[in-house]
Amino acid sequence: MPASVTKRDFDAVLFGLDGVLISRMQGTADRPGAEVEAFPGSIAWVRELREAGLRTAVVTDHTDCADVLAGAGLTNLFDTGVDGRTARETGLSGEPGPGMLLEAARRLGVAPRRTVVVEDTAAGVAAGRAGGFGLVVGVDRDGAALAGDGADLGVADLVVADLGVFLVAATDNVHRAGPREHRLLAASRRLVAAAEDYPTDPWRIVEHVYNPGYIEQTETLFAVANGFLGIRGAFEEGKPSFRPATLLNGFHETWPITYPENAHGFATTGQTIAPVPDGTALRLYVDDAPVTCETTEVREFERALDMRHGVLTRTVVYQLADGRRFRLVTTRFVSLVQRHLAGIRFELTALDAPARVVISSEMVLHRPPTETAAFDPRQTRALDDQALLPDGDHTDGVRVIRTYRTARSALRVAAGMDHEFDTEVLTHVRTRLEDDRVLVVFEGEVPAGRPVTLTKWLAYHYGPATDTDLDVRAAVTLHRARSTGYPATLADHQDQVRAFWDRSDVIWEGAPVAQQAVRFSLFSVMQATLRSEGHGMPAKGLTGTGYEGHYFWDTEVYVLPFLVHTCPEVARSLLMHRVRMLPDARRRAREVGCAGALFPWRTIGGDEASAYYAAGTAQYHIDADIAYALDQYVRVTGDTDLLVRHGAELLVETARMWAHLGFFSERRDGRFVIHKVTGPDEYTTVVDNNLFTNVMAAENLRLAADVVDRLRVESPPDHRRLVDRTGLGDEEVRVWRRAADEIYIPYDEKAGVHLQDDGFLDQAPWDFAGTPRDRYPLLLHYHPLVIYRHRVIKQADVVLATVLLPERFTADQRRRIFEHYDPLTTGDSSLSECIQAIAAADMGMYRTAEEYLIDAAAVDMADTAGNLRDGVHIASAGGTWMALVYAFAGYRWRPPVPEFSPMLPTRARRVRFPLRIRGSVLEVDIAEQRVTYSIRDGEPLTARHHGQQFTVAAGSPVSFPGRYHTHDAGPGSSPR
């Protein structure tokens, strides 16, 4: 029995349709033209078979096989098909049997003994055996499908749960991305397995069945936030729960970093986001017994995150032991209009008989978990029990405002809750204040059939410990909410969410799962940034405490591209946060012996919080990342005001850092070199001449020199102010230009490829074939020194340089770089796949690009990184937009005019999205045979389409006919 299906043993493979290629849940015999989803593992194997030269066909009793394949984007994957219509026309039996299989083999011109049959029913497997086919494979996804007809499973030569098991070894020379088994396959298994409980809805994340096994993940997936305030998706009844939390952007506690062996310039103060009192709890008691999903029978359940409106809803029907049923409907939102405000509506209906109920509305300060994250740097530090100390209470009827202060970081927070309730049924019976808990208790006799409603308002304000009016501000927020009312407040919020989608939505027709995942990515960015003014963007947004709530380079490289092109005012706010951090960056530069300013690798309050300098402070490239983002913002939006008033000073100070950090090396023929730095790849640290760092530093130096010269010529008063603020001298600018022009770029003539750093090829190769799947990510299973001495990459590094600065490399150089480094990249970072997708598309490797795109989009929807419980991967969410727009629309913003080279993914029939460029909103509409550019709003815009320049104006769209759909070529040739 062959371990794999190869051209040596077989000439063709015949596939069943339902259950083999597409989910039976989404069969379309009764729904012509309906969208279908294909199993990624199956399709990946089909593509490999065709690349290896085997022919393929589909056999099904459907009468609309061609339409189904077209709907799934699979038409070009099969040479022929035999369906129910064919069977009638040729006089074959439409029942599963060898006749249709033999007809498919005849059409392919292959002998049955040299043909493989793949079926998911016992009858189909028996037909394959009866037809004398060389290999019969049974697909048994749920452990029951093949047994359904009572046939002997032994009739099949092989029985597998997913056809992805046949994918050839990752070390083989195939058209494959990365060194490891398809991570997409693992994602598809999780998504398909959960499909019944979590059906695909393009606008909603829906959970139809109470599933306690996913509580950790769903607390993150169902979080609601606005960029300032975030609430994890724990149940209002309080249980079950994993880590319920309410988080405020920038509210943190500090702690001393201790080193057994200290050194000068090491970070001294850690910073960790501190959860504030959580006001989501509305505990329900019937006859004094708690009613929760843990204690009470759940008859009906639905929870949905409505991304179109920014609302989390849940409906549960509980049945008590005596048979009485109660319907509970909760609605929760965090306002985009009033960023300090959240609202919860709690509606209870007794379905069978009246009942005496108690509702305990609580605000709880959850103490930190006892578990630690000693071996996973992606998680958060457990704060001390005394991180938040009570600092005052104000009670007024059903309103309670409690203030706390941090023990070390000198911050105060006011947390308030207020209530509106059905006074005909409910009575406020008491308010009680405990050390870590506040309770406002309501009681009443709930009549049968009549909904009883309680509305809960939450308000949070924080500031320096010296702020004494926080409780007053919280009271004002609560009063405004009650005065406006729940319906109007919710409607105002929904208007803002709708406005976000109007300027940001990406339409993906042809694959509901892909559309849902893309929208979830954009929604996650919205929740992490839209009302973040005055703050940065935590790596997990406000959906969890992963990475301790720190701000990284994620914002500038992965999230700002989306915001610059859709929400430029939010992008400006995040850049201004970096500007305000400049004094801290200057101080940090002095601490590590540099001139100018060095931004912290990870921070909340402005100080460096990374205790591991090799993968923290040594990542000096963060200065250049910020400069790059500033340049992108100014060039795309045309907002030179930010550049002149604030950006120029930032560019000057970061350029000074680079000029001091590097030097002109005689050993490198006078080239400017930069030693002992770490690039984006954290599996290779403290090296000489990291290519990414060097080219980005050169760009930073050039930008600084350009803006100084520009101000000198175009705005002498602004130039004088810049000189006065920074003490800038003309010689400095000349040095910056020389360093940028003479930057050293490591290259190996023998290998014919740019080097990640001077010593990269001197390291030992990593044994990918001998590394078990469960040993990834490597950082959790190997000592850093083991990783550092090998050629293994955590995330795109040189490849990222080719994506951000493509003009510095020829097309052939970019191809060589991708081919060399992509197989060495583990993808252990969620920041990698989106970049690899862009680079693959640049090479014309659209199949590889699509696999990476889907992997990036699935990181949270399928929890492929295994740490969704700690929060959403916001950078990967932003990177998903980049992968779609940069890879498959081929968009480039750096040339003199925007450039596009669109190509649809196979899973898409159409992709449409807006870009705001210099005040005009350009809509890009990519269909299979036509690409159309139109102006939604603003002045005419000039761009290029596959090199052809055009100008588009409002009311006068420009279209380019052609073939814009990625397709699979015939057997034996590479896919496009």
Image (tube, rainbow, N blue to C red):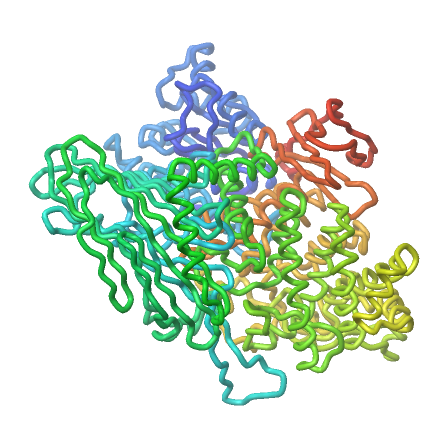
Residue 725 spot, x, y in % from top left: 79, 70
Seen in the picture, residue 611 relative to 79 is either above or below; the reply is below
Left or right of 653? Residue 338 is left
Left or right of 905? Residue 38 is left
Which is nearer the eye, 30 or 419? 419
Left or right of 324? Residue 882 is right
Seen in the picture, residue 612 relative to 173 is either above or below; the reply is below
Residue 292 spot, x, y in % from top left: 21, 49
Toward the right, the furthest residue is 713
Residue 663 spot, x, y in % from top left: 82, 77
**Residue, x 51% and y 75% (percent of image)?**
270
Which quadrant would residue 939 be assigned to in this image?
A: top right
Left or right of 634? Residue 406 is left
Which is nearer the eye, 346 or 790? 346
Residue 515 spot, x, y in % from top left: 51, 36
Q: Is residue 223 visible?
A: yes
**Residue, x 31% and y 32% (percent of image)?**
122
Seen in the picture, residue 636 relative to 808 is either above or below; the reply is above
Which is nearer the eye, 129 or 562? 562
**Residue, x 83% and y 33% (percent of image)?**
949
Seen in the picture, residue 305 relative to 62 is either above or below; the reply is below
Q: Is residue 9 visible?
A: no
Which is nearer the eye, 66 or 197? 197
Count of numbered labels shown in the rendering: 0
Toward the left, the furthest residue is 322
Q: Quadrant of the C terminus?
A: top right
